[in-house]
Image (cartoon, coloured by chain):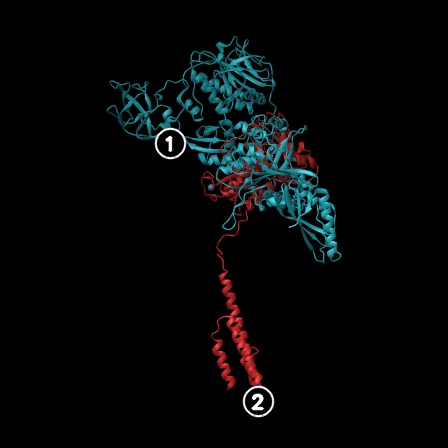
Chain colours: A red, B cyan
Amino acid sequence: MHNEELWQRYMGEISKVSNLNELQTIKVKFLGKKGEVTLALKNLKDLPPELRPEAGQKINTLKRLIEEDLEKREQELLQRALDEKLSKEAIDVTLPGYSLKLGKLHPLTQVQHRIVEIFTSMGFSVATGPEIEKDYYNFEALNLPKDHPARDMQDSFYITEEVLLRTHTSPVQVRVMEKYAPNLPIKIISPGKVYRRDDDATHSPMFAQCEGLAVDRNIRFSDLKGVLLTFIKELFGPKTKMRLRPSYFPFTEPSAEVDISCVICGGLGCKVCKGSGWLEILGAGMVHPRVLEMAGYDSSMVTGFAFGMGLERIAMLLYGIDDLRLFYDNDIRFLQMF
Amino acid sequence: MNISYNWLQEFCEIPYAARELGEKLTSVGIAVEKVTYLGNYEKVVVGEVLEVENLPGTELFKAKVSTGKEIFEVITGAKNVFAGFKYPFALPGAKLANGVTIEERRIRGVVSRGMLLSAEELGLLERKGAEPGLMLLPQEAPVGEKIEKVLELDDYLLELDLTPNRGDCLSVLGVAREVAALTGHRLKLAEPELPRVNGRCPVKITIENPELCGRYMGIVIENVKVGPSPLWLEQRLRKAGIRPINNIVDVTNYILLEYGQPLHAFDLDKLATPEIIIRNAREGEKIITLDGVERELAPEMLVIADREKPIAVAGIMGGQNTEVDDNTKTVFIEAAWFNPVSVRKTARKLGLRTDASQRFEKNVDIEGIKRALIKAALMICELCGGTIRGQYEDVYPKKFTPKVIAVSLSKAEEFLGISLDAKQVVEILESLGFTVTVGEKKIFVEVPSYRPDVSLEADIYEEIARYLGYNNFPDTMPIGITTSGFSPEYNFEYKVKNLLTALGMQEIITYSFINPDSYAKLGLSVDEVLAKSVVLLNPLSIEQSVMRTTLLPGLLDIAKRNENRQQESLLLFEMGNVFEKSGEDLPKETKLIGGIALGYSRGDWYNKPRKYDFYYVKGILESFFTSLGINNFSFAAAKDLPFLHPGKAARVYLENTEIGYLGELHPLVQKKYEFKNTPIVFELNYDLLKILIPVETKYTPLSPYPEVKRDIALLVDRETPAATCIEVIKGLAINTLKNIEIFDVYEGEKLGPNKKSIAISLTFSSTEKTLSEEEINNFIAQILNALEAKTGAKLRNF
Ligand SMILES: [Zn+2]
């Protein structure tokens, strides 16, 4: 009965404990060197020897019960204390993180990259060339002899009579063909800056182009269509339709203007497509036999296609930009939108 | 070129409405930009003036106008309002083509119901030299008839955007040929015949330069009466945008529009003798052209001359000295073929482009000249009351011989990627005016004189393709060897740009041409820079006249522009070419990376914004290099860059190659640009950088033994660069010294004047053993001795 009373007393006191210190005090009081349970164990020796085993067993059971209970309570208190501490440390997770400033690529670079990615995946590799070109590469080798009326289509910036700022990236194509002829195949794209003597709301004296060229023994007009259609669907989405209109470029024959179904209205007609449902985005054609010959290919054996597009125009359509001048104004608020 | 739909119908039956025709023409490459209905008038009719009286006390007239059904009283200020004549009349509530509506108005107390109209008020070109006033309608115009019927404005205008190869379509006939091919209907082209006339042409024609004038025809018509043309003729010209002048000139313009053949009428009595000489201009010769401008001629220009003087610039414009005027009695009509390149050059040089020159430049149909001349002669006889004197004269030194192109259909199929039906191909070509002979393996296509743009097999492929319809072709992929498309150069450039953005820099793109003044602003000698610069011959403005030799002006301009727009945190870079004279055919182009930091790093609610300074940008460059695998970069003070702060500027080296600079903008340059904050700028030579990048990185084993770190603080002269201390330590080549890092720099009074302290952390480690305390101490002693010997550095005692 003595043990039972001890247990009751322990329970009475321990139930009032609210922190680890108090728990420690109770622990000492019952289990310490001079604690009640310890004393009871010590007092066993005063009992007659025949009673000692049973009494000893009981008191040891009590000791174990108290130890287990204390252990359990201690864990609970530790947990509670930790919970309290952590809850005090809580922060406002909705505050913004420390600013790590990132820059962005110019939207024209981004659009150029998208185009490059699509064509490199179709086996076209990137070729580049000088921005200041010889008249020969910019015009003559592209079947545009001096005094050709089509030279009026591209008013140029001249350095000397024979040197000018390239008006398109086509001279890169000529240089590549010259370098590789008569080897085959050639499949390149040439993105880069070009210059024309024009400055108004819809023309910038410097702008960006990406042109492409495929030359091989078996290039067909239908291949031009297939490659462009693949490109257009990759860039503008799988539902985009393509339309070709016969046109004229001195360096291709046949030549075509390439339209896509309007990315704004889907072809129903809107302000951007001037109600037609179509947007002009590309010029293309089969490489003119004279261009192939001048570059060193036998045009009776070798054919090719070429195409070219203005990057500003494509960026404007992709992003819904309505003013060409924004690209070269370089307002960082504009640049960081993309 | 604007073409009337009704006029086209005279040449070919058209089963399509105007807009549909526009789409069809566009689909075969004759681009129709716009189709406009011309008769957008409401309640505008033919009005007959019955009575006219002066409105007392004014210069106005009160007129009674009949529309056949009703009589209206209107007030008009026009002086040419007469009873018994017919004019365009706007009924009350009428709507004009420009959208203006006419209402009843009260003028000087009198109600004016409706309005008598001038040509201008109808939106039409006035006849040249006409007195201002109402538009007089012919007597036979039915009273009350809608004005669009009488003026032939119940019509559509097709606005063509022609490609330069299709000069043949600069005429109604040319477009009609395409329409005929489109519709499959016959082209109705009559060959006019001259009545039987006796005698030779009274004018003698001599071509001195047959290269520039391949054919010259002329005819004389006498007893003409110069005056206004009939309304229908004037209206045809007006619809095409040509101002009526007089019946003679109007007929020549009519033929130009209809056949694409420019004609010119001379007043024969104004020629010195009845002789026409087509020759090159003489040195110093001048002519006053019809527009009243005196033109200086050059020997390469072709002129039409009489015995004494030039009377026209061939193919471009006539001279005032032989102009047809109201008193002209005898005209000589010219129809010719002039060399396109020559006309183009002359027109360019004179700065004079005319309807005629535009057509000659694009090659007129040398075989169509006679048709044009005879039709013009007949019209002049009919409309101006003249009679033809003698036969026409025809000097034709460059007789046309048609080209014949052999076309292999199987090759065409290979080229186009579509199978062809021989019969259909022949039909297409014949409908376009080609003459086709079918051979065994090839067809032989004879090209008509009006299609000089067709000369190769590929040109015939195009003719076939555009009529088969480009959109009816299959979409295929090229067959043949697979190519990889891998583009390492491009990829590396893209990686470099991306790396810079990851380091916080925003990419910009600026014009490659700059203002030469920019160099003065940078404190550079403009003359010196320009001496090696590439300069544009024909810039749009001085601001865009010189190809840049540095990216700096562009960076500064854009930074300034953004600072003006309250953007205070700017970290910008540009990657682009600069240009320099090279002594070779083409200038040297070098790709640079330029950057600018201006203002403050963007702070947040915890971190204060930090002002961009030299070390901020240097840190970016160091991370940039390290990310690219470059470890052998170094920076050395540069006092001699005029646009940089002499004490805050450095040259950047990879190995021992200088690849750029970094520094704070010179305060004087900063002032010129009116920057609020101080820009830090850099430029790196990308072309050098990319070749100096180590090709591959080698693995070095990690040491299993502990690393030992020792910190030393050195007391050195203020001027001693930290890099020198590092170099001295590196120079000892202690192979267990794995890392040297500066972790603190301090200047203060207690160090003494002109002294600073540099704290360096040294990390030692061996791959073979644990380094002993003694060994480390030896290394440290070695380092300190070397430092003291080479830089006078002393170990600082705390
Ligand atoms: Zn649209």
Q: Who is closer to the viewer here, B98 or B787? A: B787
Instruction: Quickly name the residue at label 1.
Output: B40
Q: Which residue is mark 2?
A: A47
User: How far across and down, in percent of the image, does residue B690 sit?
Assistant: 67, 41
Residue type, label 1: Asn
Q: Is residue B623 toward the left or the right of residue B766 in the image?
A: left
Q: Considering only vertical position in the picture, is B264 above or below B603?
A: above
Q: Is residue A141 visible?
A: no
Question: Residue A214 lies in what quarter of the image?
Answer: top right
Q: Chain ID for label 1?
A: B
SS at badge 1: loop
The tag on residue B435 is none
Q: Is residue B183 left or right of residue B689?
A: left
Measured as percent of width and height from the top left, residue B137 is found at 35, 22
Residue B776, above or below B586: below
Where is residue B271 drawn, in percent x and y? 51, 10
Res. B215 image quadrant: top right
Secondary element under disc 2, as helix, strand or loop, is loop
- Which is more foreground, mark 2 or mark 1? 2
